[in-house]
Amino acid sequence: MLSKALPAPSRKKMSSVDTAWLRMDSDSNLMMIVGVAMLDKPISAAALKLALTTRFLVLSRFRSRVVSDLSGSWWQEQTVDLDDHVVPALLAPALPAGASNKPALQQLVGALSQQPLAADKPLWQMHLVDHCVGEDGRVRQALIVRIHHCIADGVALVGVFMSMFGSKIDVAPAEPSPRARAAAEENPWAQILLPLTATGIKAIDLSSHLLIKSMGMLGELDKLGGQLAELGHTAGQLATDAVKLTTMSEDTPTRLKGKPNGKKHVAWSEPLPLAEVKAVGKAFGCSINDVLMASVAGALRAYLRAKGDAVARDCDVRVMVPVNLRKASRRQKLGNAFGLVPLVLPVGLEDPVARLFEVRRRMNELKGGYTALVAMSVLGVLGATPKQVQNEVQNYFARKATAVMSNVSGPHTPLYLAGSQLDQVMFWVPQSGDIGVGVSILSYNGGVQFGIVTDDALATDPDNIIHRFAPEFEKLVMLALMDEWREPG
């Protein structure tokens, strides 16, 4: 039951951007953000429900179902029964005794990724899975999280999820005061931003300070007065990026492109030391992002070659990367406030160092533009158009890319819930249209993990891709230690 401090049920109109995500569900791709958190000790369903009551249910979207009529879609609040949203589960032991049953957990996550959420209830659910034996032989409990993308984007949702955890093992996160709850209803982002700031969670923003500065400028055009030259440059860049986004060519056809059938396969790696990634980036004069993206490109290349495919030097794989468009200094509501940037990975380059520098060059080209802003504007327009038009535009952009990739930085220190430590955490954003591959990179507590979801029609063995990330990174480690590389140009 909900706390008496919560406001009376209400009905609120859904924004056009959120409506666009609501209507993107298809038989082949459901618009759910899916996460897996590994806890070092089992917690009870009651303890999880308590955390959800104080952190999720204070936000109206987590106690609202979606209703639609001729005027559009609405958030309709209702009484929430947490038994509908917290589902206990148990993995069967692997054979021989004590062996890892991680493949069974990955299979469960894949199956849930293709299972729709109940339309007559708020669009989120969690499975609490016992007896998960990892590759290191340790027994953990898994928390599988599914939340529809129309509620919020990945940046906001990771923040909400992490806010359930505390920074000390024996101290629970403070329950919001009635005043804080009221503020959360008026401005839910305020409730999320504080835990985010405290734990250091933030999106790795491809366009970094340049994009945020530009967003601030665009939001205050009436105050810019005589800065016509700068505004002219901004308008010109916006127009240029809009043309680029709508006229970009398709990337190289590979076995990872095609028509998905809706059956999903999921895999994730064990953590790599984040300190090593930073050291490699420093050695080559590149960012952490550059190193990670180059490792992804190398893993995809190795996988395609292992399948016997020819990989030409000019083979490019385009991934759509979500970019946070929230201003760091401004509190915002739940919802979707991001755009998509098309990053082309140089999968055809065999030399790991050349591949790394090419990724850096392409990333730098994206940092000064407004592609993400244009993409978000397109989403807003699509949410107000007939669904058939939205589908046609959505499929047009899907044909231009092979995968969706998210990259999120989490807290650097461990988090706890009901006396249990959060050991690992991984989230995937959904794929839309005919895109059938999703790649996720998430750092937490000194480690960084890669995750991947593939559609059955394109790749049934995502583990075969995941296991290639670490070797590609190790190549860069070895070359950095050898100090025999030379930057091109």
Image (cartoon, rainbow, N blue to C red):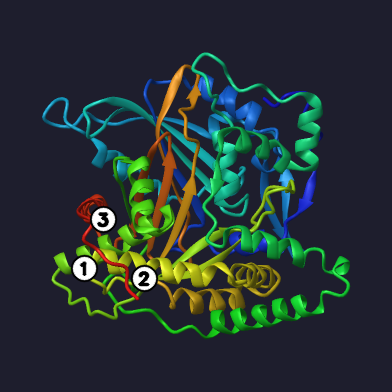
Residue positioned 70% across, 36% down in the render: 191
User: Which residue is drawn at the image coordinates 29% and 45% (left, top)?
Assistant: 269
Residue under label 1: 304
Q: Residues within 10 Å of mark 3 (few under 14, many from 20)?
A: many
Residue type at the position of mark 1: Leu
- The residue that disc 3 covers is 476
- The kind of residue tagged 2 is Glu
- The quarter of the image holding the C terminus is bottom left
How far is mark 2 from mark 3, CA to CA?
Answer: 14 Å
Residue 87, position as x, y percentages in the image: 46, 32
Determine whether 328 is above or below 485 in the image: above
Element under disc 3:
helix
Disc 1 packing (10 Å; few <14; some 14–19; many ≥20): some
Q: Earlier in the sequence, mark 2 or mark 3?
A: 2
Name the mark on residue 358: 2
Residues at marks 3 and 1, CA–CA distance in whole angstroms:
20 Å
Number of residues whose C-alpha sits closer than 10 Å to that of mark 2, classed few (under 14), some (14–19) or many (20 or more): some
Q: How far apart are marks 2 and 1 (CA)?
A: 20 Å
Q: In this view, does 363 lie to the left or right of 203?
A: left
- Amino acid type indicated by mark 3: Leu
Q: Nearer the viewer, mark 2 or mark 1?
A: 2
